[in-house]
Image (spheres, rainbow, N blue to C red):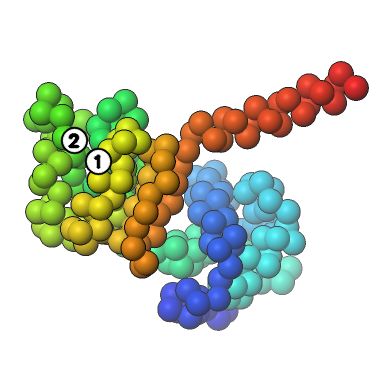
Amino acid sequence: MTSRTPAETARDIPEATVARLPVYLRALISLIEHGISTCSSEELARAAGVNSAKLRKDLSYLGSYGTRGVGYDVAYLRYQIAREIGVTQDWPVVIVGIGNLGHALANFSGFRSRGFRVVALLDADPARQEESVSGIRIRPFDHLETIVAEHSVAIGVIATPAHAAQDVADHMVTSGIRSILNFAPTVLSVPEGVDVRKVDLSIELQILAYHEQRKTQGESA
């Protein structure tokens, strides 16, 4: 078997493939939990919800991890994908905005098992400060810079209302955070070199509404 270093793969893995790697990782973890040690590309593709040709092409960017006639060693492939994504190490995360969504994110047990450690919860509302969520005390937002320096925070999560999100993002960038996951329903402006991933639940619901409408129209026709 051959493999590439993260530096080599970072230059030439298509963004669409990068977006699917976590899906493959989740499928592999599920297979391991069910006691499955080897699987074919067809079995893995089915577990991940993609076609097998696309899966094989995606994995070819990482190296040759399958064995003809045998398939993939599930545990080994899980480790290799986790390594390529970067979740074999512990990534410190800070969440800003501890309303209903922020509470839900802070209570999400899947962060730790997937390589992420929430080190701080921050909110500008004095009424929320000193509360604890999942054993972590909510601290004032103006503690951000100190926390980032203390824990070498790599990733910031924004769960604030839209009107506050840009200011939060600006402070994150100034504090040294270079990767942001944005749940606020607004587009952020950030400097070059800062990565932002946007999660807009209302847009996803609208897309589902579009497809539901198409199905209804098709049934009527």
**Residue at position x 18%, y 39% in the image:** 122
Q: Residues within 10 Å of mark 1 (few under 14, many from 20)?
A: many
Residue at point 85%, 26% (across, down): 218
Q: What secondary structure is found at the residue carrying circle 2?
A: strand
Left/right of residue 167 with respect to residue 48 in the rendered view: left
Horizontal arrangement in the rendering, residue 63 relative to residue 55 (left or right): left
Quadrant in the picture for residue 163: top left
- Residue holding disc 2: 123
Q: Residues within 10 Å of mark 2 (few under 14, many from 20)?
A: many
Looking at this view, name the residue that lies furthest to the right: 221
Residue 19 visible from this viewpoint: yes
Instruction: In the rendered structure, find residue 96 and report the number of the disc placed on it.
Output: 1
Looking at the image, residue 122 lies above or below residue 170: above
Residue 60: quadrant of the picture = bottom right
Marks 1 and 2 sit apart, C-alpha to C-alpha, by 6 Å
Q: Residue at x 21, y 31 (%)?
A: 133
Amino acid at the residue labelled 1? Val
Relative to 120, is 86 above or below?
Answer: below
Q: Is residue 144 above or below residue 218?
A: below
Residue 208 - label: none
**35 left or right, relative to 142:** right
Q: Position of residue 196 (x, y in %)?
A: 40, 54
Nearer to the camera, 174 or 88? 174
Q: Is residue 93 visible?
A: no
- On the image, the x and y values in percent for residue 170 come to 25, 53
